[in-house]
Amino acid sequence: MQTLLSLLFVAAYAAIALENPIKVNKSASALLGAGMLWSVYALYSLDPVRVNTELGDSLMGTAQIVFFLIGAMTIVEVIDAHNGFEVLTERITTQRLSTLMWMVGFVTFFLSAILDNLTTTIVMVSLMKRLLARREDRLIFAGIIVIAANAGGAWTPIGDVTTTMLWIGGQITTLAIMKGVFLASMVNLLIPLAITSYLLGKQGVESPQLKGEQDLAHTTRFERSLILALGLAILVLVPVFKSATNLPPFLGILLGLGVLWLVGDLIHREKEDEHKEHLTLASALTRIDMGSIVFFIGILLAVAVMEHSHTLTALAQWLDQIVGRLDAIVLIIGLVSAVVDNVPLVAASMGMYDLTRYPTDGFLWEFMAYCAGTGGSILVIGSAAGVAAMGLERIDFVWYARKISVMALAGYLGGAAVYIVQYQWMR
């Protein structure tokens, strides 16, 4: 069964990667893959009750991520409808792409550490649509944003879901992971930034045409600033909500949406319907990219089958037997996370290695947080940030592999080398 599931999984990923040549939408491939994988798993299983329970658990986990993604994308749409990003873009005066690239890279890196890599990617990619007119420029920036968001998310407990898993599981502590992985994560970003900056040279920024006065007249300066500040505050406070209530993040984002909806209705209550209709949260919900949402559902459900069938656990155990070296195993797990979602990989690794043998804040867990968090940048489908950027900017898998993957791999290996040297020197 595991062989058949693996073949189906590889076929689904190949169809996603070859979306343009075969002219089949990646969402269709993801949904077909998920449906076929679960069907085969159910037919080969002799315990339908267990399979249905596992499907329910997977659906619950998938729904939480999808609700969070919908909420974050809706907040971004509401801010954009109010021209809130104008408050930020009007302060960016640089006319060189390379300078803007460095600014965007560092902002994304540190914002991701405070928020999370998925939310940060959605915000920054949306912001680039306000700053860059050329699609090719936006695609390159989107690639750097994915790398920066994943690198920034790896060194804090709330920046990436895998780091959060290790933190909740007791494998890492807050201060230790921040001190241990920060430098490696920074190198992971600096190498691609330096390469991209060199390739861009002295190219200038071509800004899109600004909205006309008629569009801006529907929102005041106060309204734009208020919605921007409130939207970003909601995103920032979601981790705080999770820590304070121990409730999942999607509930925090839904609560924030309710607050944003209420405030929007109050500040626009005196306007005519034709002037405020496109500013409402209900209107923003109709503009989010449901195609990328459906794609995300298919990918997560497909990976869940590989987890429940213990295929990923078998892979991790095989690596332990064949490779032997702990640093090499973790490096390989990070590379595999470029193809397979890093969440089940880390979950399988947490089950393989006992805390009594590999204690909290040890080499294994810190290096795992770095590799699993940043290895997904090597391919656009390897992380939630990459999948979100893929949906927002219609990034082609092959284009990303040609233009971004080599730089991401160089950053990944450079950061890994820095962490190993740093660990040996300090410990």
Image (spheres, grey):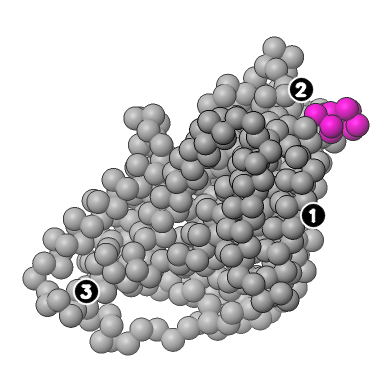
Q: Residue at x 41, y 41 (%)?
A: 249
Residue 252: name its quadrant: top left
- Packing grade of label 1 (10 A; few <14, some 14-19, many >=20) is some
Residue under circle 2? 427
Q: Foreground residue, 90 or 356? A: 356
Residue type at mark 2: give it.
Arg
Q: CA distance from mark 2 to mark 1?
A: 26 Å
Chief SS of the magenta region: helix
Is residue 228 in sight in this rendering?
yes
Residue under circle 1? 410
The kind of secondary structure element at disc 3 is: helix
Above or below, 387 against 425 in this view is below
Q: CA distance from mark 1 to mark 3?
A: 47 Å
The kind of secondary structure element at disc 1 is: helix
- Please state if 246 lies on the left or on the right of 272 as rendered: right
Q: CA distance from mark 2 to mark 3?
A: 60 Å
Q: Is residue 324 magenta?
A: yes
Give the percent coordinates (x, y) of residue 233. 34, 50
User: Which segment is the magenta one?
Assistant: 317-327
Residue type at mark 3: give it.
Glu
Residue type at mark 1: give it.
Ala
Choose the circle earlier in sequence order: 1 or 3: 3
Asked if the residue at tag 3 contacts the one at tag 2, i.e. Cβ–Cβ closer than 8 Å, the answer is no
Above or below, 413 against 79 in this view is above
Give the percent coordinates (x, y) of residue 204. 61, 82
